[in-house]
Amino acid sequence: MNIPPERESPKNIILKPAELVRVLLKFSTYPSSVVLILTNLTPLVGILFWEWNIFFTVFLYWTESITIGFFTICKMLIVGKKKKLTTITFFLGHFGFFIGMHFIYLMALFSFRESEFPREAPWAFALLFLSHLFSFCYNFLYRPPPIRSEWLCSMAFQNLTP
């Protein structure tokens, strides 16, 4: 079976730096997307160049889940009206259970001798948090989504009403 010549070379798969810049500029009308893409390159760089182990990489994404939950609660506080305390309590219970079980699974899956954090850990945690902070400020506070958040939140509150 003959493979076409344009598919043989790995050069066709890997983006050159100039092409990567051109792709990122295409997304420049969505700055939070550019920040998110660049931030999510951090674990890749950590694995390839800083010898991060798999435990730390998965733990980093676990902490990112906590960050996402934190900003979800911030959105509920801003958009919620009458029943926001009930909704936030409901969310915290379910989200806390999910995060807790995920943490237990992480600790059971990886031995504690592998759980040493690299020296770049604080920067990685901070970078992911700042990325989500930027996204929250830009996409939610500065430029609200096209579908009004109040409408979506009111639909959620109606489903929780007895």
Image (tube, rainbow, N blue to C red):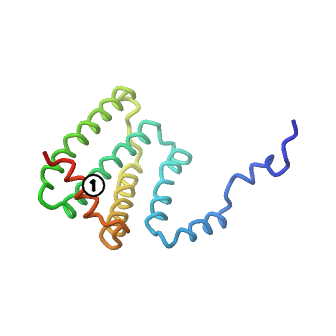
Identified by mark 1, the residue type is: Thr
Q: Is residue 95 above or below residue 144?
A: above
Disc 1 designates what residue? 72
The structure residue drawn at horizontal position 74% and vertical position 49%, both measured from the top left corner, is 10
* Front residue (pair 142, 156): 156
**Secondary structure of the residue carrying numbered label 1:** helix
Residue 119 percent location from the top left of the image: 40, 48
Q: Residues within 10 Å of mark 1 (few under 14, many from 20)?
A: some
Quadrant showing the C terminus: top left
Q: Please give the name of the residue rendered at 15% of the width and 48% of the height, measured from the top-left corner.
A: 161
Q: Position of residue 87 (x, y in %)?
A: 17, 50
**Which residue is more in the foreground, 94 or 156?**
156
Above or below 135: residue 12: above
- Foreground residue, 70 or 156? 156
Q: Nearer the viewer, residue 43 or 22?
A: 22
Q: How many marks?
A: 1
In the rendered image, the vertical position of residue 162 relative to residue 78, given as above or below: above
- Could you tell me which residue is drawn at 62 percent across and 63 percent down? 20
Residue 135 rendering spot, x and y as whole percentages: 37, 64
Give the side of residue 85 with respect to residue 108, left or right. Answer: left
Q: For residue 26, what is the image quadrant?
A: bottom right
Residue 92 point in image, percent of width and height: 20, 45
Q: Quadrant of the N terminus?
A: top right
**Residue drawn 15% across the image and 47% down it:** 89
Q: Quadrant of residue 145?
A: bottom left
